[in-house]
Image (spheres, rainbow, N blue to C red):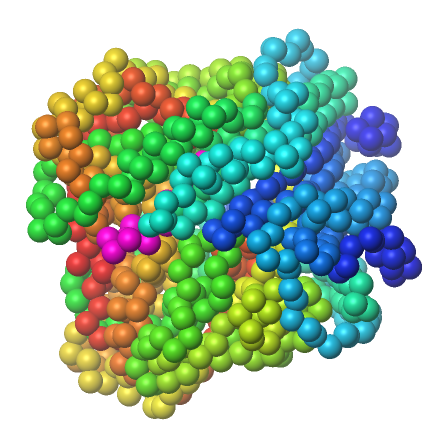
Amino acid sequence: MIGRILDALAGRVSAADAVVKTDDTLTLSISAEGDTRVSGARSQVSHLRVARQGRIGFASTSEDASSDLVGRAMSGAASGEELELFLPAPAPLPSVVTRAPQAAAADAAVLHGLARALYERLSRTDRRVEAWAERSTGAVQVANTRSVLAGYDVSLAGVGALVESISAESAPPCRIHCAGVALPTLLDVELLVDEVSRRLDPPIVERAVALFDLPLCLGPRAAATLLRPLRAALTGYEAFLGRSPLRGRLGEQLFDGKLTLSDDPTAPGRPGSRPVDDDGVVSRRVMLVEAGRLAAFASDLLVGARAQVPSTGHGWRLPHAAPRVGLTNLRMQPGAESREALLGAMGRGVLIEDLDWGAGANPLPGTIALRAPWAYLVEGGTIRGRLEGVVVSGNVFEALNQIVAVGSDATWVGSQELPSLVVKGLSLVRDR
Amino acid sequence: MKSRILDALGRSRAGYTELRLRRVWCTTVLVRGRSVEVATAAVESGGMVRTCSPGTGWGMVGFSGTERLDVPVLQAHEFSLAGASRLPVTLAPIAVRQHEAATHLDDDPREIRLTEKRQRAEVLAAALFGLDRRVVSGRILLRDEVVETWLATSEGTWIHDLRSEVSVAALAIAEEEGNVERALGSIGQRGGWRAAAGAELLVLGVASRAIERLHATPARPGRYTVVMDPAAAGALAHRAVSHLARPALPGADPDVLPIGTRVGPECLSVGDDPTAEGLRASSICDDEGTGTRRTPLVQNGVVVGHLHNRETAATTGHAPTGHARAGALRGAPHPRATNTYLAQGTGSFDDLIGGIGTGIYLADTLAAEAAGDQVSLRAGSARMIRNGRLAEAVKGVHISAGILALLGRVDAIAADFSWDTQNASCRDGSAGVVPVTTGAPHLRLVDVAVGEGSS
């Protein structure tokens, strides 16, 4: 298919690249009543980008008609952006684990075993539980008119649950999941069960507890939400040419020296792992922040061409959308202290396990006022109970310049590997 | 296509089989600053097959393309046998409907050249930047979409429909003496290429709001009487009522407002009307082939109805309301809101604000979200109300409160009902994204906490 697409363009364009992605997803879900449901989805999407007479055009299709795709991309180029695009040449690909045969072959019975294990471990008389397990398998092919022809097989498997406490002291529904290229293990299931207990079991602490000036520890899930402004500021057009507060500040010491962040598409078996990006650029680990110093932004070929910088291999083609820049696997370098040691060192403080980003907030300026439905009062290293109605506010970029400690408990949350963080510079307030 | 769909359906060994196929043509032009950044065309086709048999649960298979439709039909049956249901699937009966409406589209966007669409987007961008030199950056996103749908069931339902819509979204960023403010807005109109002919007004409005915000002061957190414009009131009705007046969706918050619950004062009536003419979420039948109907959800402050698909209707002993909507090309239909309305009351906008000493007028909602029993609204623009009149612009207006507590603070509703024309969509749990419209008059609430960490 991909060869047919590029063959049809021979002699008609100055450059072109194409991506074909296939996916076969199988999902098994268990309802709160214990019913099991199996569903599947198969898709194939072809993306084509052409450069013709100095302009760029895109098209995509889920149909098997390459001539139609070519015609629409050519039409797009007649109206597209004026830009000189430099496509990569063939290069050796790194060896990256993107597929696990066992996950790719998992059938409904295997998924049922996983989902059922989690469902039964979480079920209690005072809880309402929905659980699911899913695996997808597919392939990615990338090619361009400079003879790049690369491909890799992928699998992704996950298990998760939505748990609602129906006791008198009710908490909001708790969503947990884990995912990776390989099938989750029973150990992964137990870690999720432990997390639910940590979040749901503590009693509610009186609202009268004063929060002012208490130190704040963010668990890995909360840290993933907190870093959203940083991810936006490090990525794509906004970073190089737009309104990122970090724009033009490469090389500067902008954050606390304890912050080291990289984006690593070569991490084995994670959701963002891949040997080559969707522009045909070979994957490599990119240091974004090194001991607090801003080291790099993420770009793809298009943003690179606009900003006159090389691509960092962060090109993505998503179904029926224009090419975009995105991180792959974001990894924060862990510290030396365990989570228990972090909590113990806080004295009296607040642990936040998860944050609710909410609606409509623009992440780029870094100013936040986020609800923290999973906040806990900690005294002497011990969790005393859950705090209701807590809002975390402040500026994320300023807080990342005031990191007190980084935990050794780096945990994968989707495609991010993050440890617990103790930070200053964020305020805890109660809603009214 | 009809014979291929019916042939595939005929190969099913399941008791009930439903095949939905869609083909979507869409073009997108993005102008960032004054330069076209993206001009793209996409065609996507695919759908979903669902089957169930006596004693089995659902088997569902999503697929892309239009080839080999018999494969997902057979696979869905296998999946239905693999599921284990405590109770077999029961579907409420519906009238079998044969509806062929895929006639020629007037002003078909597919017949407009991409060059013309690009020029249109550039004209709108020029209008955005032309209003005031303080508009330093911005974006125009012009999008059109034509959707052809085929739906066939083993009960004999046959639906074939063709529709189009055009949307424009604008972002303006204004800057003055280091102060940077932004404003967003969109319109989405069902119809042909000229349906969004009035987009200049939208663009100028967005640019004006960004300018206005340069001199807006942060709203002082506190408790206020709040008047919402129709767009904000409609968003509140959608998020606080429609999302909870239907059975729980997979992966969504499981809270449901039971029928008979008092959620607000006598003046509060909310419903959902997929039959409203010409709106983006309107249709004569839903994604299961059920005829749509206007469904009251809250009448005089009390929950009186829920949105249903055939399965939830049968489970609860109600009639299907025609609200089964698939949130993705390859997604299953779930009961979802379409055009949610807050019924109008009496009096004018001036009557609502007339007696307010100090209050806040909340307009242009940026976002409305609910989590658990909490709802939050973030204003795109807002003004103080002083001595019964609109006064200075304020920013940072954010309401976050318990749903029932907030609805209980509804105090008065005006008679100036209007449907909102924003290009709005609704995401709910893992049930996907559907286009929605809201309609409401101005709404007044008393003693509402506004600002950071409000409740």
The answer to whether residue B45 of the structure is visible from this angle is yes
The answer to which quarter of the image holds residue A251 is top left
Reply above or below: B406 against B369.
below
Q: How many marks?
A: 0
Left or right for B401, reference B303: left
Reply above or below: A43 against A9.
below
Q: Which residues are magenta?
A: A164-177
Q: In which quadrant is the N terminus of chain A drawn? A: top right
Nearer to the camera, A133 or A152:
A133
Nearer to the camera, A140 or A195:
A195
Left or right for B117, reference B302: right
Reply above or below: B361 against B215.
below
The answer to which quarter of the image holds residue A399 is top left
Q: Residue at x 68, y 53 (%)?
A: B56
Q: Residue B276 in the image: state x and y as whole percent.
A: 59, 79
Q: Residue at x 18, y 34 (%)?
A: A383
The answer to whether residue A308 of the structure is visible from this angle is no
The answer to which quarter of the image holds residue A336 is top left
Q: Residue A52 in the image: state x and y as whole percent.
A: 75, 34
Q: Residue at x 83, y 26 (%)?
A: A3
Is residue A171 one of those drawn in magenta?
yes
Q: Residue A172 in the image: state x and y as whole percent.
A: 33, 51
Q: In which quadrant is the C terminus of chain A drawn? A: bottom left
Is residue A346 one of those drawn in magenta?
no
Residue furthest to the top = A92
Q: Residue at x 24, y 18 (%)?
A: A338
Q: Residue A118 in the image: state x and y as whole percent.
A: 46, 36
